[in-house]
Image: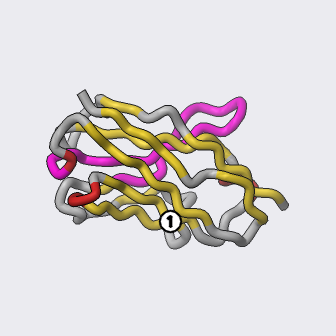
């Protein structure tokens, strides 16, 4: 089992920045592929970013490319999502997720953290 706890959400003005953190416990963090997803009101959950166990091969949704950056600190069992140049359409609940392989579905999910961007 893996437990994931997100933090760092909040209210920010358009153009501002936030950094989300996701602390993991319960399994060797360095073996996990870590991802961020988000769900806006009335919409389906969507992929935001992913990073492999080694920290390599970060990948992003087109909507956030060039503005968001995913990173991880394996000794701290933490993955981060740096969000810059935020837009009102980035408003959503952001979820951290983990899986044991590169492909396939995510096995573990956090409870989510709210990000609200005002115009």
Q: How is the protein colored in the picture?
A: secondary structure
In the picture, measured across the screen, residue 27 lies left or right of residue 115, that is: left
Which residue is at a point 44% across and 47% down the rendered structure image? 36
Q: Position of residue 37 (x, y in %)?
A: 48, 43
The residues colored magenta run 30-50
Determine whether 103 is above or below 79 in the image: above
Local crowd at mark 1 within 10 Å, few (<14), some, or many (≥20)?
Answer: some
**Quadrant where the image shows the N terminus:** top left
Which residue is at a point 56% across and 54% down the rendered structure image? 8
In the picture, measured across the screen, residue 29 lies left or right of residue 20, that is: left
Total numbered circles: 1
In the picture, measured across the screen, residue 92 lies left or right of residue 55, that is: right
Which residue is at a point 76% across and 66% down the rendered structure image? 14
* Magenta stretch: includes residue 72: no
- Front position in the image: 82 or 41: 82
Q: Secondary structure at mark 1?
A: strand
**Residue underneath mark 1:** 82
Which residue is at a point 54% across and 35% down the rendered structure image? 45
Q: Position of residue 67 (x, y in %)?
A: 55, 70
Q: Quadrant of residue 64?
A: bottom right
Q: Position of residue 91 (x, y in %)?
A: 69, 49
- Front position in the image: 20 or 57: 20
Q: Quadrant of residue 13?
A: bottom right
- Front position in the image: 45 or 54: 54
Q: Position of residue 117 (x, y in %)?
A: 74, 56
**Quadrant where the image shows the C terminus:** bottom right
Q: Residue furthest right?
A: 119
């Amino acid at each position: 089992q893996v437990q994931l706890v997100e933090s760092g959400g909040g209210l920010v003005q358009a153009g501002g920045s936030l950094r989300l953190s996701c602390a993991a416990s319960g399994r060797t963090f360095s073996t996990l592929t870590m991802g961020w997803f988000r769900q806006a009101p009335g919409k389906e959950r969507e992929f935001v970013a992913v990073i492999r166990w080694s920290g390599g091969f970060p990948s992003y949704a087109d909507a956030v490319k060039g503005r968001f950056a995913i990173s991880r600190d394996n000794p701290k069992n933490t993955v981060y999502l740096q969000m810059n140049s935020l837009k009102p359409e980035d408003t959503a609940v952001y979820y951290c997720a983990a899986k044991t392989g590169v492909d396939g579905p995510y096995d573990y999910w956090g409870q989510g953290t709210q990000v609200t961007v005002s115009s």
